[in-house]
Image (tube, rainbow, N blue to C red):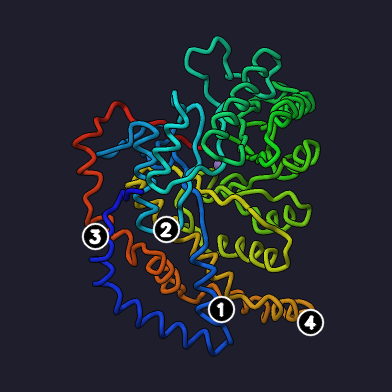
Amino acid sequence: MFKAVQKEIIDEQNKLAKASLDFDFEYLEKKLKENQIDIRSILNQVKKFQVAVPTWGVGTGGTRFARFPGIGEPQNIYDKIEDCAVINDLIGFTNKVSPHFPWDNVDDFSELKEFADGYGIGFDVVNSNTFQDPAGAPETFKYGSLTNASSAIRDRAIEVNIQSIESGKTLGSKGLTVWIGDGGNFPGQISFSKSLERYIDSMKKIYATLPKDWIVLLEHKPYEPAFYSTVINDWGTSYVCAKELGEQAMCLVDLGHHLPNTNIEMIVSRLIDVNKLGGFHFNDSKFGDDDLDAGSINPYELFLIFNELTVASQNNKIKNIAFMIDQSHNVTDPIESLISSANEIVNSYTKSLLVNFSLLEKAQDSNDAIQSMQILKTAFNTDVSPIVAMARFENGNSIDPIKTYRKLDYKKNKSLTRKNEGGSSSGIV
Ligand SMILES: [Mn+2]
C-alpha cells in the first residue's frame, strides 16, 4: 500500500505537538475520572469511528450563480480518490468514499477499485444521479425521473439506478442512496398521489435488483429544485416508502434536508424506533440545504443527534448505520473543510459517549428538567479534542491535521499536473 501523505511528515509534525497533547490528555483523564469515566475506554471507541467522504465534496462546489474553482482541483475520480486519501492519511477516520454516478463513471471499475485499494480507500454507499440529464440521452429528466409521467423516462431513471448498483458491486459497496429532485413548481403541476405511486413502482423495480447483502437508502428533502412540492419531501413519506419496499430499504437523514427549526434529533429517534434508520448525510445549515461544514453552525444539534445514536447503540437498537458527509465547499479548500468536518463529527460522537444515560433516565423519570439538561450540557461543554487528537495519533495519523496539511503545499504541487479543464462535477445534493 502506498501513502498520499508521507508518514515521515506526519511523524515529524506529531513530534512537535505530542508534549502539549499529553498535557491536555492527562488533565482531561483526571477530570473525567471525577465522574467515573475511563478515558481509555472512550478513546478505544473513538479510534474505531468511521465516516465516509463524498467524492463530489473534494471539488469546489458552487452556488446557483457561479463556481470559483481553486488551484489543483481534482479532474476525475482518480484525482478525487487521491484527495480523499490525503484526508484519510491525516485523520484516519475516513477510510471510505461515497461515489456519485454518472459523475464518477469509468470504463473499468475493477481498475478503479484497485487504485483506491492501493491507498487503503474503500467504497461506501453509492449514489445515483437522476436530477441531471445523462450525457447524450434522448430522454430528459426535466419533468422528473422515477416519478415522470412517461414510462420510457421512468425506465431510463430506473436503469441509471440499476447501473449504479452494478458499478457499486464491482467497487465493493453494500448500498445505494436514492435522492430524486422530482416535484413541481406550481400547484396543479403534478398529481401528489400519482407521483408517489410511480415512485414506489419505480423503486420496486430497483429494489428487485438489489443484492441480498445490500441496503437502499431513501433520502428525503422538503424543497429544491422543486419549490412548490417535492415527491419525497419528508421522513414520514420516506418511511412509508421504505416500509412498502421491504427490509433492505432504509431512510437516510441529510441534516440539511429539513425545514428551519425542525427537531432533527427527534426524527432520528423516531426512525430508530421504527427500525428504519439507515444512514446520514452530515453537513450544517442556517437556512436550507446549505451544505455547510458539519458542526460549523449548530454543533449542539450534531451532539444531540449523536446522543440518540449512542443511547440506541448501547441498548442494541441499531447497528451498521452508514455515516457519510454531504457538503459543498465554495470558499475553502475542500480538503481542509472535510478534515475539519470529519473531526467535528467525531467530536460530537465522543461527547455523546460521556453522557451517563442511566443517570439521564433517572432525572427524566423524576421530572427533573434542569438536571436532565445539565447532564447533556456537561458532556457538550467538555473539550474532548484531546481524545480525538489522541485517537488520530494512536491510529498513526496527525495530531494537528490542518497544520500538517498546510505544510504539504498539496494543491500547489498538484496544480503543476492537474490542469483545470472547467472542474469536476460537484453539486448540492
Ligand atoms: Mn444528501
In which of the image's four quarters is ligand 1 placed?
top right
Secondary structure beneath dot 1 equals helix
Residue situated in front as seen by the camera: 180 or 27: 27
Mark 2: secondary structure? loop
Residue 175's tag is: none
* Quadrant of the rendered image containing residue 383: bottom left
Q: Determine crowd level at label 2: few under 14, some 14-19, many 20+ residues with C-alpha closer than 10 A.
A: many
Residue 200: % across, % down: 76, 29
Q: Earlier in the sequence, mark 3 or mark 4?
A: 3
Kindly identify which numbered label has been placed on residue 92: 2
Q: Residue at 66% across / 48% down in the picture?
A: 278
Tag 3, which secondary structure?
helix
| Residues at marks 2 and 4 touching, judged by CB atoms closer than 8 Å | no
Q: Earlier in the sequence, mark 2 or mark 3?
A: 3
Asked if the residue at tag 1 contacts the one at tag 3, i.e. Cβ–Cβ closer than 8 Å, the answer is: no
Q: Which residue is mark 4?
A: 366
Give the residue number, with chain letter if any, for mark 1.
Answer: 378
Q: Kindly identify the residue that appears in the image at 35 percent across and 44 percent down.
A: 83
